Amino acid sequence: MQPTYPMDDTQWSKLIQNVAYYFDDLTLKRGFQYYKQNRVQPFTMTEPRKINALVEGREDYRVTIDLDGFTNCHCNCPVSGHCKHMAAVLLSYAEQQNRSVQVLANAKAASFLPKISSTATSTSIGADATRQQQMKEMANRIASGKIMEWREYFEFCISPLAHTTRNPEYVSRALSAINKFKPKMLPETEKLFTLHAHLYLLEKLAKPSTQSVGQAAYAPSLGYYTQVAVSELQEVITGLLKKTLPLSPEQEQDLWPYVIDTLSYLRREMLTESRDRSRDQPSFSLSYDLLWRNWIYPNTGGTKLYLNEIEQLQQAEGELGASLSQHAWLLAQSRMYYYLMDDQKAWDLLNKAAERPGLHPDELMSFTSPLLDAGDWSRLVGWLVQIGPLLSSRLYNLNSYSTSWEEAVRHLPEAELQMWDTLATMLPISGEVYEEKLITYEKWQTWMDYQLSIGKQPSEFRVKDLQPVEKNAPEVLLPFYHQAAERFVLDKNRHSYKAAVKLLKRLSKLYKKLKQEERWEEFLTAFAIRHSRLRALQEELRKGKLIP
């Protein structure tokens, strides 16, 4: 891309306003797709405010953009007016200028942000200098300050962004402001600080801005770009919490209070978090689990901390009232009994939580991951048996659950019967996994009985899907093909007769493989006589060279 003339903040603000005025939402959306697909070829700027570009569509379209006069913009595509090709060029221009493509693509919302008037510029500069000094003073205290002081610092840093659209650009600017005057810290302290900065922003984006005491938790409606920002924040938080926080005896005295304060914060957020049955595990619930699993559990011993957490959870029920999420509350207690090795109590709480929809499958599977890593196969089997019937969401992929069973049975062969019983109990949710395992374990007759019980037809399988059965246990396919052929004949139309003949030819091969040609001939003779009045069927049998 050739060098372009730089754009200042005033010109950027004007560009957002022009895009919001001249382009509708649908055009911007289509333009964003073209931009993401890299359809804009390297553009040139022969003048400071003029862009010439080529955009790949059904054919190559030439686009001219006048940044100072949007009525003079032109594209030689069939659309009259401002089109998606122009939008794509402007988004590429924003990227080249290191400006937020998301803000420009969401210009309709961004254009309503309050603008600073020219008369307020000098006052703004003075106020900004004062703010910078205040931020420096607050930053000097946060290295030895408590988490509450960190949060006050976060709030002060991002307050100028209060009216900014909540999107990835907002998060980037907020983190930049927070880190601008951050003092040097020990690596462990800095990790905690970074974690809380991201948790603070996650709370700002994902939780309702106002919610009265005693009000039940509800799911706020997040815009597309806000949801993208939330997902990116959660990814960073998860990455931080998945790495252990090893504490030396010298560090423990100073850092352990921060860990306990983090636990208190996550407990409250987790217990009041909305659950909208989305594909993603609730953010604070995930963070609470990872904190215990990777930061607290490796650094503690005995039972005191887990018993204390159960006590804290019991107290929270009275403090939070109607805003308490029963699912999260029961799940958290179950985790503590899990760490206390009281699995029966943990299972009782999980089953109670699962009485109403709201538990995410990943929350259930999180109990098995540490057991899998530790090789505690006997306990793992117990948990797989218990949580299997609770994995009732059709949106969830059971591959992780299936893999856990494979590992458990490989190390504990006597658990295989429990696996089959559990998967059968989970039907029809477990159908795909159940079928796959029956094939893997070469349980051909059980596999066939299952297909017949759910009314499957041979036509619903590809030939290669049935090849393992035909190769290893062809006899089990005989009733499958026989029944299907008879059902086709009952439809009494030419198409079904052709399908019946196709199946009969496959049956012929099976009988030959089984060396039962005589039995096949007896069946085919009886079949042809029984349906002798169906002329169309007789014709198809002759075409298939099954009868003379």
Image: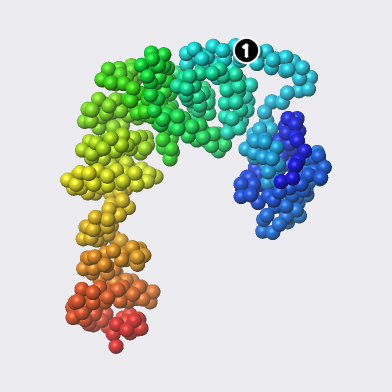
Figure quadrant of residue 524: bottom left
Left of 253 or right of it: where is 190?
right
Q: Which residue is mark 1?
A: 134
Residue at image location 72% in from the left, 14% down from the top: 126
Residue 27, visible in the rendered structure: no
Residue at image location 73% in from the left, 33% down from the top: 12
Residue at image location 75% in from the left, 31% down from the top: 8
Residue at image location 32% in from the left, 52% down from the top: 432
Residue 2, visible in the rendered structure: yes
In the rendering, at what x and y percent does residue 22 appear? 73, 41
Is 514 drawn above or below residue 162 in the view shown?
below
Categorize mark 1 by other alpha carbons within 10 Å: few (<14), some (14-19), many (20+).
Answer: some
Left of 35 or right of it: where is 438?
left
For the residue labelled by badge 1, is the local secondary structure a helix, a strand or a loop? helix
Is 397 drawn above or below residue 157 in the view shown?
below
Nearest the eye: 297 or 457: 297
Residue that sits furthest to the bottom in the current view: 548
Is 429 drawn above or below residue 155 in the view shown?
below
Q: Amino acid at mark 1?
A: Gln
Nearest the eye: 393 or 243: 243
